[in-house]
Image: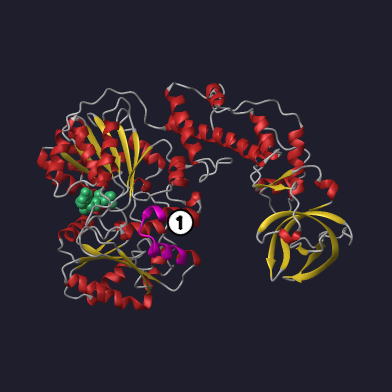
Amino acid sequence: MAALRGVGAATRERLARLGVRTVGDLLTHLPRGYQDRRRLLPLAQVASGSDACVSATVVRVGSFRHRGRRTPAITIADDAGDAATLYAFGRPQFGRSLLPGQRVLVYGRFDRRGGRLSAGSFELMCPQEAAAGALVPVYPATAGLTQPALRRMVDAVLAAAAPPEPFRVPAETAAARRLPDKAQALACVHRPASLESAEDARRALAYEELFLLHLQLARRSPAGRPRPVRRRAGRLQAAMIERLPFALTDSQRTALAEIDADLYGPRTSARLLQGDVGCGKTLVALLAAAGVVDAGQQAAIVVPSEALCFQHAETASRLLEPLGVRLGLLSGSTDRAARVLLLATLAAGGVDVLVSTHAVLSEPVRFADLGLVVIDEQHKFGVAQRAAVAAKAPAGDLILMTATPIPRTLALTFYGDLTLTSIDEQPPGRPPLRTHLVRGDHRERVYRHVESELAAGRQAYFVCPSIGGDGAAPDDTGDLFAGAHPPAAAPAAGASDSSASARALHTRLRERFAGHRIGLVHGAMAAAEQRAVLSAFHAGAVNALVATTVVEVGLDVPNATCMVVEHAERFGLAALHQLRGRVGRGADHAYAFFIFGSELTPQAVERLRALKEHADGFALADLDLALRGPGELSGTRQAGMPPLRFARLAADLDLMREAQADARRHHRAGGGAPDGGRPACG
Ligand code: ADP
Ligand code: MG
């Protein structure tokens, strides 16, 4: 795209701050709104907090000092005699050429306080200047770059007769959606005749943007490849369900039906199975695996931690082995001899279901016939890792599971290559979890409560942000892939803070809860050691577990009723929600105690409050989005999506769906790049 011409170095640098480097960038620098100069309001009718355009006379040009800087203050009055004051913050030279009695047109954001009208953000023009346009764009601007300057630059580009340019979507789609010419749509968003036409033009541009994004996603997706249809026996699934001590929830049943439709369909599938902590995703995954095994193929379940690997292997052996399904377990702690044997058995088809950590990626693992890959806690894996795991089953199906719900619009943008299934109910008979926020100096009250729970035979978790002692890593995500929630930096001298360090807390709690068995688990321990402690906790032989976030995801010990998190302010919202999801999985009342230290940032306070107020992961995901913005949200940054210039995440959900469907159809029909080979999305 052509570089900007006739623009000085200083302006160029300012434009770059807005992401504008080329003519094309300038044309796609979308106005954030429009000044409507057609409707002039008498000052008496201007609502506080709203944008308005008024015609008035300058009464007085004065100034006052604001934060030590000269700030011009211009008083204007309209024909009815009502007055308002305009404050030119940060523009000390403003008003030099204004004279009392002069007619002006003012567009501003007005506030009314104590009956006085004022505007701290405004544009002032002489009436002739204003007559030029009725709807005037207001651009995202930056210091030193004014609205009129931006408008002049855009005008210059628009005036340089752009050749007609079709949208980069298939001709029949453009016709069906009645898309105008692209150059015309761009001109229209900058210089609209009406607000409606501006919005129509923006949606046309957004549609193209989303179509190209989804086309790229469809190409990258492992889904949609034709493959032989699987034989549907259903015997194993039915036998499993029959042996369960409970009934599937309706949500689990629906999710399974959707997954089955994929598994027995004519094309490969890729599905995102979302569901809040504790809703029972593991069971759905194992049932799906059973279906594939029934058809004579293999399944692999990949998890992000050793702890989860052992747990899933145990669950699988409880549910599947009695039915004759042959299991394999591969993790970082599988010893060499066992590994060699396992790999040979897998390649020969002697293992039906493999439960594995990301070790499956570092090994030259070959399957006889891998039909299904399930990635649990998928947000803990990177894009490349997910793709590498999926590549193990080129003609197979892929299920990604996550308990970190993301708002639907974001899911469609960032996981647009996947089909979504949500489990939105918890198994019955679980009393609601109670979340308490506790100041550090009230810790003892929490301990007394935990003591009574332990005395009643129940169990507890204590989670610390760091391992502490012995010069070990100061923090411990316990993840094989460092997730998007870095625990806020641990203090440099972590060991001195005995409640932040797992080792120190373990020592302290062994004294405090003498008579109970207190275990310790963290990521710096050997995998076999971790496994021993976790099995003892599962079995109830360890009453309370002091841990780092190695227990953040997936662990399932229904007898545990207390989750105590030390320095909760150092954890992200999603991590805290996951952590409290470790309890409340049984019929007993369960409690989460988030103990906070003294160094609370306003964001930490908001996070903790949100957790106390909302039990539902989806509500929290929306809040997380609002607090941190989409770029920071779990998993999305790694997804490396291009920023969207025209589409609006919340408002364009319908467009997003349509663009996704159109792009998938185009891709399946063997459609190339709609503009004849140029790569989509740069
Ligand atoms: P998550 O979705 O967080 O991975 P899990 O798969 O770990 O949840 O399941 C949480 C617990 O709920 C497990 O103890 C599991 O046995 C139990 N569970 C799963 N489905 C049901 C059900 N339909 N009714 C009762 N309990 C269930
Ligand atoms: Mg789980």
**In this rendering, would 162 be left or right of 680?**
right
Q: Work out whether 344 lies above or below 19.
A: above
Residue 80: quadrant of the picture: bottom right
Magenta region, mostly helix, strand or loop? Answer: helix
Q: Can I make out residue 311 in this image?
A: no
In magenta, the rendered stretch is 605-619
Q: Is residue 501 magenta?
A: no
Residue under the point 12% across and 44% down: 243
Q: 137 or 449: nearer the eye?
A: 137
Instruction: Indicate whether residue 612 is drawn in magenta.
Output: yes
- Element at label 1: helix
- Counting from the top left corner in percent of width and height, residue 19 is at 64, 44
Q: Residue at x 31, y 27 (%)?
A: 395
As drawn, is 21 to the left or to the right of 628?
right
Q: Is residue 398 visible?
A: yes
Q: How many marks?
A: 1
> x%, y% of residue 387?
38, 36
Residue 536, image x, y percentages: 17, 60
Label 1 sits on what residue type? Answer: Leu
* Color scheme of the displayed model: secondary structure
Q: Quadrant of residue 186?
A: top right
Residue sitting nearer the eye, 563 or 87? 87
Residue 670 is left or right of residue 456, and the answer is: right
Residue identified by numbered label 1: 623
Quadrant of the drawing holding the N terminus:
top right
- Residue 135 at x, y percent in the picture: 72, 43
Judge by depth and name the residue closer to the eye, 238 or 527.
238
Residue 551, above or below 232: below
Crowding around mark 1 (Cα neighbors within 10 Å: few <14, some 14 to 19, many 20+) is: some
